[in-house]
Every structure is written in C-alpha cells, then in structure tokens.
Amino acid sequence: MLSGAACDLVTMGTLRERGYDCRWRTIDAGITPENRILVGLPLSAAQREEQGATVGLKHVQLQATYARAHRPQLHVPQAHRPQHRANVRAQRGDDTAPAGDLRNAPTGKQASDADNGQTLP
C-alpha cells in the first residue's frame, strides 16, 4: 500500500503526462493531517512541446549514463599488472628490473659516476 505522499507523486506524474503543470503545496499539519495540495494548470501547446523536448533530452542522457555504467570492463590478467610482477620478483629474490626495463637505471650524475668506476651511493 502506497503512503499518501507516494500516491500524490504518482498523481503528479499522471497529470504531467496528460499535459498539466503540477505544483505541490503544503498547509499547516495542525489544520489537517492531509496537508498536501496538488495544483495542476493546463500547459499551452508551446509549453507541452518544450516539456516533451526536455523529457526526450533527459531520457537520452539517462540512457547514455546507464550504458556507461553497465559497459563491460576491460579485464587485465593479473600477470600483466605491475604490482604482481614486483611481487613475483620479490618472492624469487630478484631485486633487479627485468631486461629492457629502464625504470631503475641510473641517470644523470649517477650514470656518469658508474661509468667512471665509482661506487654509487
């Protein structure tokens, strides 16, 4: 069973579909517990067209958002994730970077010191 407020929302939706501009007003609850007033005024033809265009645009936006939220996610196998590779190297006791990986290679002054035969700090 719908509550009074839910019933009023359904009524407002029905009236809007039938071409009415609906407003919801409340009066003091001390006067009556049924304190909601629905006011519906008929829309002009231009207002109905504008409302239909707005609803159509919102529907298209909602569909695009839904499609984005529910598109299939790209699955990256665990073996290709950088953190997994680092964990495997640590378990093997291999502290060096794999061949061709220059992320840990010395640069700048460190590289020139290494070329001169000096130990790196």
Image (cartoon, grey):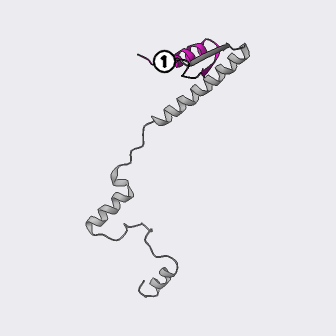
Q: Nearer the viewer, residue 56 or 15?
A: 15
Residue 72 vertical placement versus 33 (above, below): below
- In the figure, residue 91 lies in which quadrant? bottom left
| Quadrant housing the C terminus | bottom left
Q: Secondary structure at mark 1?
A: helix
Residue 114 vertical placement versus 95 (above, below): below
| Position of residue 54 measured from the top left corner of the image (x, y, whole percent) | 64, 24
Q: For the point 52% across and 34% down, which residue is it? A: 65
Q: For the point 64% across and 13% down, which residue is it? A: 19
| Position of residue 57 measured from the top left corner of the image (x, y, whole percent) | 62, 26
Tell whether 118 sits left or right of 95: right
Q: For the point 52% across and 78% down, which residue is it? A: 108
The magenta stretch spans residue 83: no
Question: What is the crowding at mark 1: few (fewer than 14 residues within 10 Å), some, or many (at least 20)?
Answer: few
The magenta stretch spans residue 8: yes
Tell whether 80 sits left or right of 3: left
Q: Nearer the viewer, residue 64 or 80?
A: 64
| Position of residue 103 measured from the top left corner of the image (x, y, whole percent) | 44, 68
Q: For the point 59% across and 17% down, which residue is it? A: 37
> Disc 1 marks which amino acid?
Gly
Magenta-colored span: 1-30
Number of numbered discs on residues = 1
List the residue tagged with mark 1.
4
- Residue most toward the left? 92
- In the figure, residue 16 lies in which quadrant? top right
| Position of residue 119 measured from the top left corner of the image (x, y, whole percent) | 41, 86
- In the figure, residue 11 lies in which quadrant? top right
Residue 74 vertical placement versus 99 (above, below): above
| Quadrant housing the N terminus | top left
